[in-house]
């Protein structure tokens, strides 16, 4: 958002003083909200409305857009709590909207031999729906506060199943699947079955439903005492990228896995998450 020609008492951004330029930059930066840009006359060349100063996350950037002027620069600064809150709120406002969601008519809570085999294999303890049309195990994604279903993701159960292995039934690409939000440690994994394996081992399993995380969902992870990022071996770089995103907000670490967590017993999953094995990926 660009704010045109307004005054901050006791000094005006329209009347920046070249002699006290650094002092003015510090003052203006303190009064900038996260993500805002302010415009003024350039203190160097006098260009009208050609000077801007922007506060991005972790840095302040200023420059003059007049071709003959070389005034520009940047300063790095640690974000304060208000900067963090503003950033999260803005990301939330631009995230995918919570569109009304209804499960398709062919997705039912019913008994099925192929679904029962899948549920028993991975020791899934909560309700899993069945897509009669495409033979999929369907995991509903509820809102943590209202428990209203916001979306769903389905796993093909037959080798020659129609379509991709995993299928999204909703359009909200920023959703995550939580097994239980009330435990102390949350474990970020890729799919719902791995999340359920974490839940069986005593952790909150959180499925990204892929290997990427939307910044609007950082707020959902902040109540946990610790977040452990445990993606599959082929997503080690993605895990480190997510850690970098979360580091300013919470206590988090990465566990490099020998294999997908859903293939281990609850005791082994607990040992891996609590005391990760000495395993170093090729990065």
Image (cartoon, grey):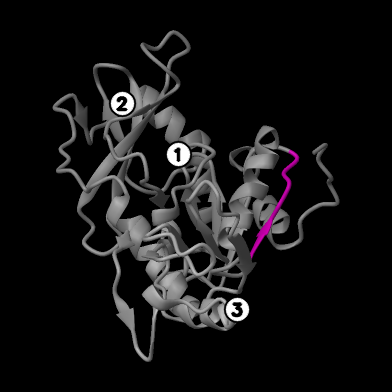
Which is in the foreground here, disc 3 or disc 2? 3
x 37%, y 74%: residue: 14
Q: Earlier in the sequence, mark 1 or mark 2?
A: 2
The percent position of residue 127, horizontal first and vertical second, equals 31, 44
Q: In the image as oriented, which residue stretches furthest toward the top?
A: 160
- Distance between the alpha carbons at the discs numbered 1 and 3: 47 Å
The circle on residue 51 is: none
Q: Which residue is mark 1?
A: 209
Question: Is the residue 130 above or below the residue 15 in the image?
Answer: above
x 63%, y 68%: residue: 76
**Left or right: 129, with 251 as reference point:** left
Residue 224 or residue 271, whichever sits in front: 224
Q: Which residue is mark 3?
A: 22
Q: Is residue 239 magenta?
A: no
Q: Which residue is mark 2?
A: 112
Q: Which residues are magenta?
A: 252-258
Q: Residues within 10 Å of mark 3 (few under 14, many from 20)?
A: few
Q: In the image as oriented, which residue stretches furthest toward the bottom?
A: 10
Which secondary structure, mark 2? Answer: loop
């Amino acid at each position: 958002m660009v704010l045109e020609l307004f005054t901050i008492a006791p000094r005006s951004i329209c009347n920046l003083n070249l002699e006290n330029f650094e002092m003015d930059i510090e003052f203006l930066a303190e009064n900038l909200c996260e993500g805002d840009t302010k415009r003024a006359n350039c203190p160097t060349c006098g260009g009208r409305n050609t000077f801007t100063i922007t506060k991005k996350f972790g840095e302040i950037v200023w420059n003059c857009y007049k071709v003959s002027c070389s005034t520009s620069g940047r300063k790095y600064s640690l974000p304060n709590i208000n900067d963090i809150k503003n950033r999260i709120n803005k990301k939330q406002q631009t995230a995918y909207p919570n569109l009304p969601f209804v499960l398709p008519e062919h997705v039912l809570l019913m008994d099925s031999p192929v679904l029962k085999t899948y549920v028993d294999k991975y020791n899934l303890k909560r309700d899993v729906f069945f897509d009669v049309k495409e033979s999929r195990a369907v995991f509903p994604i509820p809102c943590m506060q209202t428990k209203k279903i916001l979306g769903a993701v389905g796993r093909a159960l037959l080798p020659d199943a129609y379509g991709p292995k995993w299928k999204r039934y909703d359009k909200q690409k920023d959703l995550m699947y939580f097994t239980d939000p009330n435990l102390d440690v949350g474990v970020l994994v890729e799919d719902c079955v791995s999340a359920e394996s974490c839940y069986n081992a005593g952790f909150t399993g959180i499925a990204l439903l892929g290997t990427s995380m939307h910044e609007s969902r950082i707020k959902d992870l902040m109540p946990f005492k610790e977040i452990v990022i445990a993606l599959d071996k082929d997503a080690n770089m993605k895990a480190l990228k997510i850690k970098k995103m979360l580091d300013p907000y919470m206590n988090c670490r990465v566990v490099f896995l020998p294999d997908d967590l859903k293939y281990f017993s609850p005791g082994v999953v607990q040992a891996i998450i609590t005391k990760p094995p000495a395993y170093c990926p090729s990065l």
